[in-house]
Image (cartoon, rainbow, N blue to C red):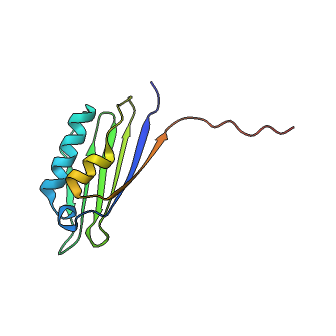
């Protein structure tokens, strides 16, 4: 088994009200879990910051984890999915535009456990 793949996702231009809405984020997590065939080992844990603050959420998966941190004051959401089993590509930009109103989505895919060869010294 490969050590896995990690998606680091920055969503900009999001609707601040969506970033404060627990139901919106729960629905986003559910869609990710279903679409990617992920296996939660427990219910998600959520923390809502007071007043106009954002939300932090985490789900522990049998494959690893799914997290989200929202910053309504910046229109920004940071998501992270680490999975030790191969998964299909997910349409991050399209889904985050639908769910959060994101206008720009940056996705970094990082293969975990891959050793980079050291430069040869000749």
Residue 28 seen in this snapshot: yes
Horizontal and vertical percent position of residue 62? 30, 33
- Tell me which residue sits at (21%, 61%) in the image: 47
- Asked where in the image residue 32 lies, by quadrant, the reply is top left
Q: Residue furthest left?
A: 23
Q: Is residue 9 above or below residue 62?
A: below
Q: Nearer the viewer, residue 1 or 6?
A: 6
**Quarter of the rendering containing residue 24:** bottom left
Task: Tell me the residue at 32%/46% (across/down).
Answer: 92
Is 50 left or right of 80, judged from the image as shown?
A: left
> Residue 103: x, y in percent?
31, 59
Where's residue 21, x and y in %? 15, 61
x, y percentage for residue 119? 75, 40
| Residue at the far top in the pictured view | 1
Along the line of sight, which residue is nearer the eye, 43 or 26?
26
Tell me the quadrant of the picture where the C terminus can be found.
Answer: top right
Residue 87 image-quadrant placement: top left
- Taking the spot 28% from the left edge, 34% from the top edge, the residue there is 36
* Residue 40 visible in the displayed image: no
Q: Quadrant of the N terminus?
A: top left
């Amino acid at each position: 088994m490969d050590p896995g793949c990690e998606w680091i996702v920055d969503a900009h231009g999001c609707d601040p009200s969506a970033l404060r809405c627990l139901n919106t984020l729960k629905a986003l997590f559910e869609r990710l879990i279903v679409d990617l065939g992920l296996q939660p080992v427990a219910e998600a844990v959520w923390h809502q910051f007071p007043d106009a603050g954002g939300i932090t959420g985490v789900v522990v998966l049998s494959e690893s984890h799914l997290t989200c941190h929202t910053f309504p004051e910046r229109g920004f959401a940071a998501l992270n999915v680490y999975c030790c089993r191969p998964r299909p590509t997910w349409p991050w930009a399209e889904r985050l535009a639908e769910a959060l109103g994101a206008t720009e989505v940056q996705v970094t895919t990082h293969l975990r456990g891959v050793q980079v060869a050291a430069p040869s010294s000749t």
